[in-house]
Image (spheres, rainbow, N blue to C red):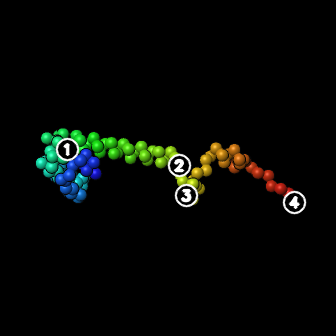
């Protein structure tokens, strides 16, 4: 996704391939055409290409993290019943009710 955002056109992705030294990683591979990379974004070396992709990936991750933080800070939607039931704050419930640890007297008839 970051490679496409950078502007690479000729790429191929292998999902379940792994590095020989990390056989359980299943990191995947990204095959990039050298001629395609030079033509589309002007990257002459592998290092330059990786720097561009890595910078774009970090930007994407940062924006996802910020969006998630904003969503959590905003709280549940108005019509969300499950989230609304967990919305009760302790400060309001303590001010409205007496402490539940006190012994309550029973009314005599």
Report helix, strand or loop for mark 1.
Answer: loop
Residue 109's disc is 4
How far apart marks 2 and 4 lie (CA) works out to: 48 Å
How far apart marks 4 and 3 lie (CA) works out to: 45 Å
Does residue 79 lie above or below 68 as drawn?
below
Report helix, strand or loop for mark 4.
Answer: loop
Percent coordinates x, y for residue 7 in the rendering: 23, 47
How far apart marks 1 and 4 lie (CA) works out to: 88 Å
Tell me the mark number nearer the camera, choosing from 1 and 4: 1
- Callout 2 crowding tier (Cα within 10 Å): few <14, some 14–19, many ≥20: few
Q: Residue furthest left?
A: 35
Residue 106's disc is none
Residue 75's disc is 2
Disc on the earlier residue, 4 or 3: 3
Q: Are marks 1 and 2 in contact (CB under 8 Å)?
A: no
Give me the residue at 57% from left, 54% from top.
78
Residue, disc 3: 80
């Amino acid at each position: 996704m970051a490679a496409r955002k950078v502007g690479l056109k000729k790429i191929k992705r292998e999902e379940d391939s792994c590095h020989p030294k990390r056989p359980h990683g299943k990191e995947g591979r990204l095959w990039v055409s050298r001629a395609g990379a030079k033509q589309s974004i002007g990257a002459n070396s592998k290092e330059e290409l990786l720097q561009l992709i890595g910078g774009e990936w970090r930007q994407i991750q940062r924006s996802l993290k910020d969006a998630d933080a904003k969503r959590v800070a905003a709280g549940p939607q108005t019509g969300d019943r499950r989230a609304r039931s967990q919305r009760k704050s302790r400060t309001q419930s303590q001010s409205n009710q007496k402490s539940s640890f006190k012994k309550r007297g029973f009314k005599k008839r």
